[in-house]
Image (cartoon, rainbow, N blue to C red):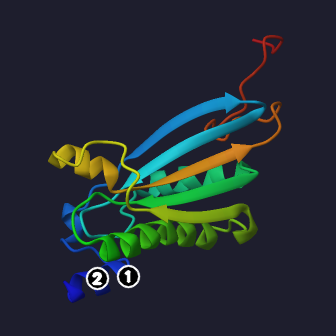
Amino acid sequence: MSAELDKASRGEPSVPLKQLRSEIEEIQTAINGVTATLVRAHFASGSALLALSTEAKSALLAAAARADEIRIRGGTDNSGSVTVNELLARERANSMRRLLIDGGIAAEKLQTSSSHGEYIATNSTVAGRAQNRRVDVVFANHEASRTPVAQNEPNPGPHAEQ
C-alpha cells in the first residue's frame, strides 16, 4: 500500500499509461449573473495522473484564460483507506492546478480543494466508482455580458449580419 501511496503522491498511475482513460464532461449554467462551466476529468483507480488529450488540454487552458475565477476540487471513490483517499483527492486537484499554471494561468485565479466523500455516483458498481474518481473544475465569469467560457467563439447576437 505504501508504494501505491507514493505513486499517487507523485501523480503516477498505478496501472500502465495505455490503460488510463480520462473523459471531460462539460456543463454550463448561468445563475444570478454568474456564468459558470463545470468540467470534470476522470482518473484511473489509485492515480492522480491527468491523462488528457492535447485537444482536451487546449480546451481547458482556453476556458481558464477566459474565466474570472477557477475552482478545482479533487475527488475519489470509496476504495482504499480514508488517509489514502484524502491524499489522492488532494493530488488530483493539484494535478489540474499544475496543468493550468504550467499552461500560463495565473495562480491567483485558482482555488483548490478536495474531498473523498462527495460522490456523484454509487460506489457499488465499477462504473459508479469510475465516475467518482475525478476532478471538478468550475470556470466562472461574474459579468453576465461576457462570453461563456465553454464557447470557443463569441455567439453572434440576434442583430449579427448573416
Residue occupying the point 46% across, 71% down: 90
At 54% from the left edge and 52% from the top edge, which residue is drawn?
A: 137
In which quarter of the view is residue 45 placed?
A: bottom left
Residue 113 against residue 91 in the figure, above or below: above
Residue type, label 2: Leu
Secondary structure beneath label 1: helix
Does 19 sit above or below residue 124?
A: below
Nearer to us in this view, 83 or 24: 83
Q: Nearer the viewer, residue 160 or 129?
A: 129
- Residue drawn at x 81%, y 15% is 160
Quarter holding the N terminus is bottom left
CB-based contact (under 8 Å), mark 1 and mark 2: yes
- Viewer-side residue, 153 vs 95: 95
Which residue matches tag 2?
5
Q: Residues within 10 Å of mark 2 (few under 14, many from 20)?
A: some
> Along the horizontal axis of the image, is 38 left or right of 13?
right
Residue occupying the far left of the picture: 125
> Which quarter of the picture shows residue 101?
bottom right
The type of residue carrying mark 1 is: Ser
Estimate the spatial distance between the alpha carbons at disc 1 and disc 2, rounded to whole Å.
Answer: 6 Å
Q: Which residue is mark 1?
A: 9
Mark 1 is surrounded, within 10 Å at the Cα level, by few (under 14), some (14 to 19) or many (20 or more) other residues, namely many
Asked whether, in this view, residue 8 is left or right of residue 79, the answer is: right
